[in-house]
Image (tube, rainbow, N blue to C red):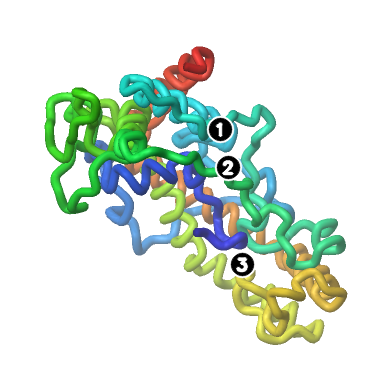
Amino acid sequence: MFSPHAPRAVLAASAAVLALLLTGCSQPDGGKAGGPGADPDAGKEPAIGAVPALLESRSLVFPLAPYSADDRQIAVLDEAQDVLIDQCMQRYGFRYQQRRRADAAARQDENRRYGLSDPAEAARSGYTNPRSGGPAKSQQQSLGPNEKLVLNGLEVDPSLPVPMSQEEAEKSDVATTVVGGQKVPAGGCLRESSLKLFTPTKGTVDGMVAQGYGLEAYGRAQKDSRVVAATKAWSECMAQHGYAGFKDPTGPPPGIDESALGSPQAITMAGQDVACKKETNLVGVWYTVEVAYQQRAIERNAETLDLAKKQLDERMKLAATLQASGA
């Protein structure tokens, strides 16, 4: 699970089942670099041009954003996947009750991508992050033995070469079983729903590929000499105001217990933290550098990312249809 201070994982909410069940979706090597980590300019820092003065990170927009689902799309995909699970369960005489509903108001939020940077939030809550709790978990559905088998499939050796796309699954009997005279697919209805929505064919790009490039860009930007210099300036600013030991803008405040992140002491410290970020333009520098690394990733992997975008659009059209049908 990501720290509330780390960059958000674009598909983390929607693809929780996908990540657990698919264990390695196919990804065509369409980009010039061949995938995250294969950048031929890995040792070179990209040019960045003028650096804008920025502070709050909540509404920042990134070049890689169009290539992966945003929060609103994730919510729609969640609902669509549950419809597919229910459709699958109905083939065996069961219903899937644990349904999610898309939140039309869901929006992207880069809060604390570079650490606490909202003056109003710092004054109100200190280092407490009101967004770190996550959505409430829905109550688990009580299942009978056959119902559970249909939903989850057989417990099999994870190293078994199960089909990695719906196209392959429809032609395979690997890890399948039978309930009521009907074949239950490998991984049950949970896996089938994921394959149908996220990996319908062998040529499907891994839905997490853009997020992977984004996380790589974030990591490289963090080590970039210009971000390192801005971080050092922020750290020195904090020390000059009596707060020694601040080295990582995204880490927990030194000397403050987790239970006291909203205490008066933490609120005072948080206010100075944000003031030093403004004085050193840490957010402006880091954002500008990260954008440059993302642009480089797009240039090096244009074919793969264009395919990912096309498939995301197709996925959203399917999700809209499923959402309308409601099963």
Helix, strand, or loop for circle 2?
Answer: loop
Report whether 158 appears left or right of 205: left
Q: Secondary structure at mark 1?
A: loop
Instruction: Report whether residue 279 is seen.
Output: no
Whether 5 is drawn above or below 256: the answer is above
Q: CA distance from mark 3 to mark 2?
A: 31 Å
Q: Earlier in the sequence, mark 1 or mark 2?
A: 1
Percent position of residue 186, x then y:
22, 37
Q: Residue at left 41%, top 56%? A: 216
Badge 1 vs badge 2, beta-carbon distance below 8 Å = yes
According to the image, label 1 marks what residue? 100
Residue under label 3, please give it: 250
> Is the residue 91 above or below the residue 142 in the image?
above
Crowding around mark 3 (Cα neighbors within 10 Å: few <14, some 14 to 19, many 20+) is some
Circles 3 and 1: CB distance less than 8 Å? no
Residue at the image position 51 percent from the left and 43 percent from the top: 140
Indicate the secondary structure of the residue bearing disc 3. Answer: loop
Could you say which is closer to the camera, residue 73 or residue 42?
73
